[in-house]
Amino acid sequence: MTTRRLTVGQALVEFLANQWTIDGDVRERTIPGMFGIFGHGNVAGVGQALKQYHVDRPGLMPYLQARNEQAMVHEAVGYARMHRRRATYASTASVGPGAANMLTAAALATTNRLPALLLPSDTFATRVSDPVLQQIELPHDTSLQVTDAFRPLSRFFDRVDRPEQLFSIALAALRVLTDPAETGAVTIALPEDVQAEWVDVPEEFLQPREWHIRRPVPERGPLERAIAAIRSAERPVIVAGGGVLYSGAEQRLDEFARATGIPVGTTQAGGGSLAWDHPQYLGGIGATGTTAANRIAADADLVIGIGTRCSDFTTASRTAFQHADVRFVNINIASFDAYKHGSQLPVVADAREALDALLEALAGHAVPAEHAARVASEKTAWDALVDEAFLPSGLALPGQPEIIGAVQAASDPRDVVVQAAGSLPGDLHKLWRVRDPLGYHVEYAFSCMGYEIAGGLGVKRGAPDRDVIVMVGDGSYLMLHTELVTAVAEGIKIIVVLIQNHGYASIGHLSESVGAERFGTLYRRLDPESLDFQGTEVLPVDLAMNARSYGVDVIEVQPTENAVADLSAALVTAKASSTSTLIHINSDPLVYAPDGEGWWDVPVAQVSTLDSTRAALVDYRDHQAGQRPLLG
C-alpha cells in the first residue's frame, strides 16, 4: 500500500478537496472551499495545511476569510441551498469561543436539513499541558469540552483523538453530508495537537471519490394507497416544502398541478416551487400564509405534503386543516418527516421520483369542477389584495408591505431575495411574487436573527450570475452585520435593504397579541425613573453610517412622501453597480400586511393583573379551540 506522510490537518484538507457529488448528470465539488478564523487551536493544523497547499498546489482548497465563526456556517448554508444540497463549504474554528460561536449555525443547518461541514478545534488530546487556554474544566467530567455541545446539534459528530482515526471518521462524515435524508451539520472535532501530528496516509484515501445523491423511488404499496386517496378526494391540497426544490422537482410539480387541478400552497422553504402566477398556486400556507391557501386548506379532505417538515407555521399550529375526516399523504425522503402527525399514508421517497409516479398513475384525473372554480376565485381575490398592499401610500414612513412591493417591482425574475427573522418572513411569505425556483431564500426553520447578510453572501457565492437582495430589519442587522466587511474585501456584490424600525417590529406585534404591550421591544434610551425602555426618545444610532464605515456604498432614502419612489430608484442604482450597496429606509412598523387568516400558538399568561393580558387570553382560547391532533 502506497502512503504519504502528512499531518492530520494536511490529510483532511487534501481529502476534502477530492470529494465530488454526483446528482444525475450533475457533477460538482462537494467542498469547493474552506472558511477559517484562526487561533491557537487550528493555526498549526488546518491553518498550516491551507497555507501549504495554497503555495504548493494553488486552487486545491481555496481559503475564504470571515469575521465571525457563526457567519462562516451561515454562508455555507446559503451556498448549499442554492446548489440544492449538492455542495457546501467547510468551516474551521479555534478552540473555546471560536468553536462555541458556531453552535447557533450548527443548529440552523440541522434544522433546515442543509449540509454544512464544521471543523471546530479541541484542546490537547494528550492533555500534556492540561488545562490550556480556553479549556472548560468541569470537575464531574474533565473530558467534556466545548465541542461536546455540538453533539445534539449535529447530524454527525466525531472527534479525531488519534491520527489513525481520521480515515474512517472523514468517510463517515461525507456519507452523512451527502445523504439527503440525513444531512445537516456534520461536525469533526479536531484536537489542536492531533491536527499537527503526522500520519502515513494511504494514497487511496486522497484520490477523487464520488458520492451519489440517493433518489429513492416510492414503494408500490404506499404509492398505491396514496393514489387511491387522491382519486377519492374531493378537495385535495398540496403543501410543497423545500424537498421539492432540493430534488429539482419543481417542473414535475408544475405538470402535476396543471394536470390534476390540485391547488398548491408552499412552506417558507418551498417558496419558488411554483411561480406566483401559476393557476394552481395559492401562495404561502399556514400561520404566515395567504387567505387563498388557508381557506382552501381549512376545507381540504386530503393534504398532500411533498418534502415538508410540517412545522407549526405550516400547520398554523394544527389549526389549518379543519375538515372532520382530513387525511395526510406525506411524501418525504426522510421517514422521520413522512410519518409526521400520525399520517397513515406516508410515502418515503424522493419528491421528483414520487411526482413522476403520480403523474403516470393519475393521468386523466382532475379535481371536481367546483373545487377548481373555488381555487381560481380565492387566488384572484388574494392577488387583488396584494396589488392593493403594494400601492404607494405617500407616507413619509411607509409600511413594510409597500417596501416589499417597491423591491419586488425593481427586481428581476432571477434575483434572489434573502431573509430569515422578524416580521419580514411572514410578509414575504404572503406578498413576494416568486418568479424563479431559487429566487426565494428565507431561512425559517431556525429563523435565526443575523443570518441574512452572511446567508446572502453564501447565496451570491452559489449564484454569482444573480443579484442577491438581502432584506433585513434593524434588529436582525445589529445581530450580525460584520460580514459586510467580507463583501468589501472580496468584491462580492450584494444589495442590502435595511428597514429601520427602531426596535423589534415582529416581537413588538407578538408582544401586543399576548398582552405584554410591546415591553422591551423598542430601541429607546433607558428611562431613569421608570427603569424601562418604553420612552419616546429614539436612540441616535446611525446604521447607514455604520455600513458606510465598512466600505459599502450606501443610499439613504429620506422620510418624505416620495420615499417609496426613491427606494425603487435606489434599487435600480444598486442593481447597476458592481459593488455591494446598502439602502437604508425608515418605516412604520405598525402598518401590517393583509391578514392571511393563519394562527400561531404562543401561550398567553393564564393569570394576570394586566387588562391587556386578560383580553389576550380570551382571544387565545378562542383560537386554541380550533387545534386538533391531525391524526391522518
Image (tube, helix red, strand yellow):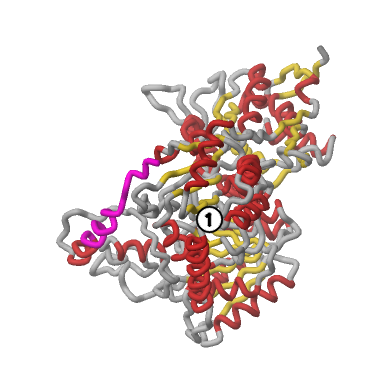
Q: Can residue 220 be seen in the rendering of this structure?
A: yes
Residue 12 drawn at (x, y percent): 70, 28
Query: Camera-side residue: 448 or 284?
Result: 284
Residue located at (74% from left, 29% from top): 15
Residue at position x 56%, y 66% from top?
Answer: 432
Q: Which residue is mark 1?
A: 367
Tell whether position 531 is magenta: no
Q: Quadrant of residue 158?
A: top right
**Which residue corresponds to the image point at 61% horizontal and 66% vertical from the top-left?**
277
Relative image position of residue 216 (x, y in whole percent)? 63, 33
- Residue 479 vertical position relative to residue 48 in the rendered view, above or below: below
Q: Position of residue 603 (x, y in %)?
A: 28, 53
In the drawing, does residue 205 fall left or right of residue 389?
A: right
Per the rendered image, the range of residues in magenta is 617-632
On the rendered image, what quadrant is the C terminus found in?
top left
Extreme-top residue of the structure: 1
- 3 above or below 184? above
Q: Which of the pair 412/184 is nearer the observer?
A: 412
Q: Quadrant of the N terminus?
A: top right
Q: Can residue 586 be seen here?
A: no
| Local crowd size for mark 1, using a 10 Å CA cut-off: few (<14), some (14–19), many (≥20) | some
Image position, residue 195 (x, y; %): 65, 26
The disc labelled 1 sits on which kind of residue?
Answer: Val
Q: Element at badge 1?
A: loop
Q: Quadrant of residue 534?
A: bottom left
